[in-house]
Image (spheres, grey):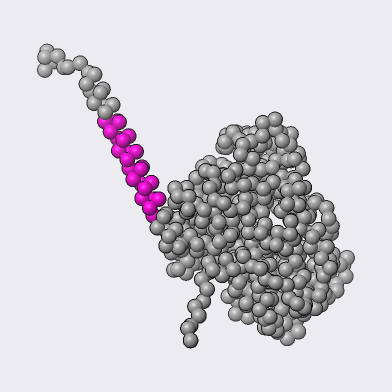
Amino acid sequence: MPISRPLSPARMFADLVGTTTPAPERPLLRRVVVMGGSIAGLFAARALSDAAAEVVIVERDELDESADARRGVPHGQQVHALLAAGRMQLDRWFPGFSAACVAEGAFVAPPADLRLALTGRNRRLRSVHPGIMSASRPFLEAMIRRRVLALPAVTVRTGRATGLEFVGETVTGVRVEVDGDERVERADLVVDATGRSSRLGEWLEKAGWERPALVRLPIALTYATGYFAPSEQPPEPPITLLRDLPGRTNVAVYGPIEGERFIVMLSGYDENRPATTIDDFRAQIRDDLPERFTRAAAGEPLGPIRLYHMGDSRRREFASAYRLPARLVAVGDAVASFNPTYGQGISSAALHAVCLESFLATQPDLDVPAYGFFERQHLVVDAAWRMSTITDELRVGTPLPHTVGERVARLLTRFVLTAAPLDTTVEATATAAGFMLVHPDALLSPPVITRAAVAHGRDAACRAQAAARQGLGRLAERLNEFRGHDPVPDEAT
């Protein structure tokens, strides 16, 4: 009997991204409580709505159908992008979602019009992957929320989650404070989707469980976003992302969004903080960026410049925690949040929800810790973490704790990414990894590494030839200068 080999991370990731997990024939759970009604919580509620008779979202903000910014999303006025991986899942959960967003004003950038500096060089993409959707965060969240709250199984409790209830080795509910009174929402499964500031680790430790290890990478990122009416000369292409720029502005992006507006974002690290007034914002654009950014910000300002600071990227290691209670999972930023300039947050949250679907499809024993879920989720977190921290780690000079294998993988990944502008096949794979359509290990396949090596070799040869031609040109100039001098007179000898 042949021995089955475990699937590679790239294959497991591909199975998650391309999932067609059918809905269970009958509910596996009576009642699920999702703590947090932001995008990650909404995705989890959608994934669980097929497996539970009732899904209760506990959220302190009022959840309605409006596209207004919420107090619980302090970065909600900043640029957000919906990568291809997230769009695919939303269109699977809600057929026609992308088309509905475009009909209401969102913009989808085809690859031919999107300049993406995954490698530090800016060029038109030649890949065939779906483009990025450009829309404001409140708009995207409202479009998702309307559809999730319309599901028969989903209801909302307005209140603040303050702790967990346990019976033996199992989580049995969530304590919720409503208008100063506390009640318990009973649950067969509890999902933490309360974001970066999640107190789940604190609650677990206080109750005698293990607090999952927290890994941080300081990035000291500050970014500023402005909204503008269209100018008389719209920028071309209509959406642009520039990365790893020298000087004060490190990352810049603009694009059209719903409401016939342009959104423009500038970001910098450490002391290179972006401008905070309209005049200074435009001056920074003129000083640091191509003219098309000036066009994007030339229209009438639609409100003040909005600033947000993010001190670090972080991840909580649930998969390696040795002691967790049963019937508890966490998703979204409560597990991992990354440098937002890579645009991975929404798509990562969508894939966390896919991990829930995949886990429940195995008919797991829910009276033991959900390590089957956390192992799937760990794969998604690793993929986003490598792509977002691979540059930040070098920039800040703070090495993260990696295994020898991961260190080698990161070195090879950097080698391949720097070859992407030199080879269309390498570029297509790098773009797919950046869009979270494939695992970064796809960059480490022998064919891709071989093409990257050939591209680097060809580029080095071209550079050497150019340097040789330049050197010969300088030599020829010197010879011509020498020949142009008058001979030395005999009297001077």
Q: Is residue 176 left or right of residue 14?
A: right
Image position, residue 115 (x, y; %): 57, 44
Q: How many discs appear?
A: 0
* Residue 279 shows in the view: no
Q: Residue at x 71, y 35 (%)?
A: 230
Question: Range of the magenta residues?
Answer: 453-475
Task: List x then y, in percent, for residue 217.
Answer: 56, 60
Please, is residue 321 above or below residue 384 in the view?
A: below
Please give left or right for residue 170 compared with residue 435 in the image. Answer: right
Q: In the picture, residue 480 is in which quadrant?
A: top left
Where 2 sits versus 311, above or below? below
Looking at the rendered image, the quarter that the C terminus falls into is top left
**Residue at x 82% of width, y 63% of height:** 149
User: Looking at the picture, does residue 216 appear above or below residue 279?
Assistant: below
Queried whether the magenta region covers residue 463, the answer comes back as yes
Residue in the image at 52% along x and 61% along y: 440
Q: Is residue 152 left or right of residue 307?
A: right
Between residue 258 and residue 288, name the one nearer to us. Answer: 258
Whether the magenta-drawn stretch holds residue 12 is answered as no
User: Residue 333's x, y, as percent?
Assistant: 67, 63
Q: Is residue 168 in view from this perspective? A: yes
| Residue drawn at (74%, 56%) of the image | 96
Question: Outermost residue, front direction?
Answer: 1
Relative to 293, is 403 above or below? below
Main SS of the magenta part reads helix
Percent x, y of residue 67: 80, 51
